[in-house]
Image (spheres, rainbow, N blue to C red):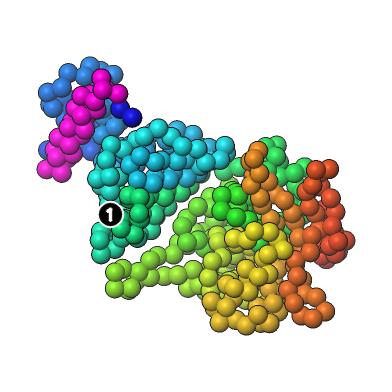
Amino acid sequence: MVKPAEAPAASAGLSMVGEVRTSVLAGTAAVTAAGLADAVRTSGRLLGSEGTLNAVDRIRAELQGLGPLQHLLGTDDITDILVNGPGDTWIDGVGGLRRVPRLFESESEVRALAVRLIAAGGRRLDDGSPCVDVRLGGYRIHAVLPPLSTGGTLLSIRIRRSKVFSLGELTASGTVPQGMAATLVAVMKGRLNFLISGATGTGKTTLLSALLGMAGSTERLVLVEDAAELNPQHPHTVGLQSRSGNLEGAGGVDLADLVRNALRMRPDRLIVGECRGGEVRDLLMAMNTGHDGAGGTVHANSAAAVPARLTALGALAGLSPASLALQAGTALDVVIHLVRIPTGRRVDQIALVGLNSEGQLTVRPALSVNDDGCVKGEAWEALQQRLAGSGLRS
């Protein structure tokens, strides 16, 4: 809450931002550091050198960045910014969800920021289109307006990590248990087909980027994503990103379309950032037609829940449970499951995918983590045989 003594300064700051914004829109001030500094000086306010620099930073954030949220981007630890109306802002990252002091003075300020960010992403946010999702630079932004939102304008901002972690760094941090690192290396070197599963915020994309960084330097990686988040340290990657349709529904390109196009781009590894719909059919078909080393992520509460999740996604593509089981059982090799624990994120299980005697899709644990460390499961030897068939053993 703003203290009484600070209120005049805050009000003056907002007034100055409004004046400079008007100058920019009128074309009398350039959106550059020098142009904004000149606009601040001509506003008539005596701020001094440091005050002018702070004002320029604030105005640039208001005009080009995330406005009052911009200063939250100071570290790579922040993965999400969640605004639940003017008085309730949260950040998510390594330390989990935590609340931050009030950053907005009114509902109109939150709404104005949401409208500007959505417009910068090429969409419109208003009463006729009150729920919108856009991709803007390194952000994925979702906004909801009242009355659909009962507590004011909602903003959910997913931040693409600028830093890419290697498998060694993830092992050192505890995300990948020591006893699992060698198996993950063998899975990648042996070009097994895989899915990384886990709930929201468990680090699926981070792990996938790290694993893709181990792909051979002569391999061509084609990445298909709903929102571009993967940035593996690899010399030959090609990214494809889906596109939403306009208000009339025209111009949209979904993940299934992109997967089919990716197959014509000579991929050595086909990667789907997140399987969330009918594209699972096209990915499994690709895996079954010689595209080994392929992978992706999927939302699931456990490795054992992946068959049910795939069955549901297959139904969206018109696949019967039996057809999905046959496709997935012959296409996929392993599921790598991540969980979120109080100390951070962790690979909890590596499981082997297959079919049982009744033709049902099964996911059996090969390596799991408990209080004693990594424990070999019932499918450990079968996984070793599959790796041996690819020329590798972990």
Provide residue 349's location: percent of width, then percent of height.
74, 54
Specify start and end residues of the magenta stretch as a single range. 3-26
Provide residue 145's location: percent of width, then percent of height.
31, 55
Give whichever of 295, 150 is nearer the camera.
150
Residue wearing tag 1: 119
Q: Is residue 21 magenta?
A: yes
Q: Quadrant of residue 242?
A: bottom left
Give whichever of 321, 144 is nearer the camera.
144
Q: Quadrant of residue 37?
A: top left
Provide residue 45's location: percent of width, then percent of height.
15, 22
Q: Residue furthest top?
A: 48
Residue 264 seen by the camera: no
Is residue 7 toward the left or the right of residue 178 in the image? left
Q: Residue at 24% across / 25% down in the picture?
A: 7
Q: Residue at 72% across / 63% down in the picture?
A: 304
Provide residue 211's location: percent of width, then percent of height.
65, 51
Q: Residue at 39% across / 45% down in the picture?
A: 83
Q: Is residue 380 magenta?
A: no
Q: Label 1 is placed on what type of residue?
A: Ala
Is residue 131 toward the left or the right of residue 353 in the image? left
